Amino acid sequence: MCKIYSLWKVVFFSLFLFVVVQLALAQDIPASPEEPQRPAVVAFVNVNVVPMDRERILPQQTVIVRADRISEIGPVDTTDIPEGALRIDGRDKYLMPGLVDMHVHQNYEYQLTLFIANGVTTIRNMWGMEYHLRLREQIKKGKLIGPTIYTTGPLIDGNPPVWPGSTVVETSERATQVVAEHKKAGYDFIKVYDRLSLECYDAIIEAAAKHGMPVVGHVPTAVGLEHVLAAGQHSMEHLFGYSDFLQIEDSPPWQQIDETKIPHIVQTTREAGIWNCVTLVVLQKRLSSEEAEQERKLAHMKYVPPTQKLEWFEGRRFEDQNHSRKMRKRMTKALHDAGARILLGSDTPNPYVVPGIALHQELRNLVDAGLTPYEAIKAGTRNAAECLGVLNEFGTVTVGLRADLLLVEDNPLVDVGNAARRAGVMLRGRWFPQSELQAMLDALAIKHATEENSDGVMLHGRWYPRSVLEPMVDWYKERMDAQNESQKEELVEAVLSSDRIFLAGNGPVARSVAMKLMQPGLQVYVAGDATTPAIGKGDLLMATSRFGESTTTFNIASAAKSSGAGVVLLTQLPPFFESRIRDISDLVFVLGPDFDEAAGLFVDELVTLITEKRRKN
């Protein structure tokens, strides 16, 4: 088994532990101390309970939590609080179930913090890989703080697939085999995509039923909405199938539709019992240049890594989407009024769809579409649990269920925006007061501000200049260097023994790192994307320059293995790429999804050490 090191994890946690505490002491920012001994019992005292089993409030209750379960709910005057319990004052506050985001792409650890800090205690990941199975176990065992994860396997698509990295199936036999593989691996759902043939789609539906795996995802073009409804697909995403079904021939999606078809298709949807995760917010965030400019100024953007913001800022641009947004809300209301089942989801981290925060925006979208606050919240609590088949686990505030809870300052059934006015979050029985959640967010803001070389960061209405942050940044760099010294030595020895490095990453970053690594005369094999130009002749051997090509599935492990390199470096790639290279090299170093200043310094030092070693030898 190869050795895998992750610089970015060391950087984040070193910065988190030091910076937050120091700023708390020096600048009156709430600190997040080391995790105390968790109390065996927690009591929410004199709280208004929003059980979400039906539209009602239970006033002045005491809710007892033991370990990770709700053990008792009763009137404050008659419910005894066990000796030694942690008491949480619930006076004038409301206790509701934690929220579920039913459509996310969990690729970066910063997302976990934003989910929890915004009361999202469960997520449904919609493009799964081995990384997500490992992440799910790490969270379950308490090694990472994050929401409970349910995940599909890799996308199953036809040839050519829409996205590289999808599992391509072209025969019913292969489709049946892939479903069995996903079941064996431990995924929760099968996800189907746009370019599947009708034959392969039907084979997937049949095989998934035999394995007890719900099928979720898009409506393949060759299959069509009515066939998907008849086939019993478990959930559909983004209302894409409806736009294709309703639109007048040759018109853009949602621009010109045949409204006479709406009553029939919503009734058919209700009778099919299929769930719709409408993700109105993802289209809402397809912004014009002017809208994007305003979005960048919002306070919560400081929690997004600079590399991701750069991608959002310089990526796709959209013209006015107002008509499409209105039509999608109208379709959501039509489905709801017909009794069809609606789910809450965001499709984060699409451009400007910020994890956690976007889910509260989606709650508002559902209310704007015509649902009541109760119905909107139900889409992300009880409905989500029912769709996942775990109503006996969470989704309501009920004795015996898992203690995933959200304590808010005012009644969310009156104003859905109150679900964002947090006093704290309980995650599987662990209590996070708002001060601790804010400290976690502050750590993200500071980390990202230093990465993008900004002049400072605004926290709690107070400006912290870079001069205040720089000593802390220097400290964590020194700490990082000390912790990684032995790893650097291993890297140097491995590089010198083979003279070859395999480098995979975002095009411009891969180019920059490759040029540095070539300075001591190393052979560098690069797997970049379509933006990676040739760097030079002879020294640089391009493994591929078509990272985004859709005609074949990109196989990073195969390319790395064929290079014969002794060291594999991953730069600015999602962590799930680790799973593709675990067994093909003696040494793998993950510089992280965010290629920050510290990672750049590490590469510079690696080059210096290699040069010095060669000179001595």
Image (tube, rainbow, N blue to C red):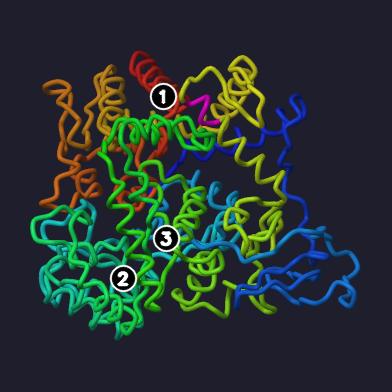
Q: Nearer the viewer, residue 315 or 252?
A: 252
Q: Would you say residue 57 sits in the magenta stretch?
A: no
Q: Amino acid at mark 3?
A: Ala
Mark found first going from the N terminus, 1 or 3: 3
Residue at the spot x=43%, y=20% of the render? 605
Front: mark 2 or 3: 3
Residue at the spot x=19%, y=42% of the render? 547
Q: Residues within 10 Å of mark 3 (few under 14, many from 20)?
A: many
- Which residue is identified by label 2? 190
Magenta residues span 447-451
| Image quadrant assignment for residue 49 | bottom right
Front: mark 1 or 3: 3
Mark found first going from the N terminus, 2 or 1: 2
- Which residue is identified by label 1? 600
Marks 1 and 3: CB-CB under 8 Å?
A: no
| Residue 421 on image: x %, y % | 65, 50
Q: Nearer the viewer, residue 542 or 312?
A: 312
Residue at the spot x=45%, y=55% of the render? 365
Point out which mark residue 369 bears. Answer: 3
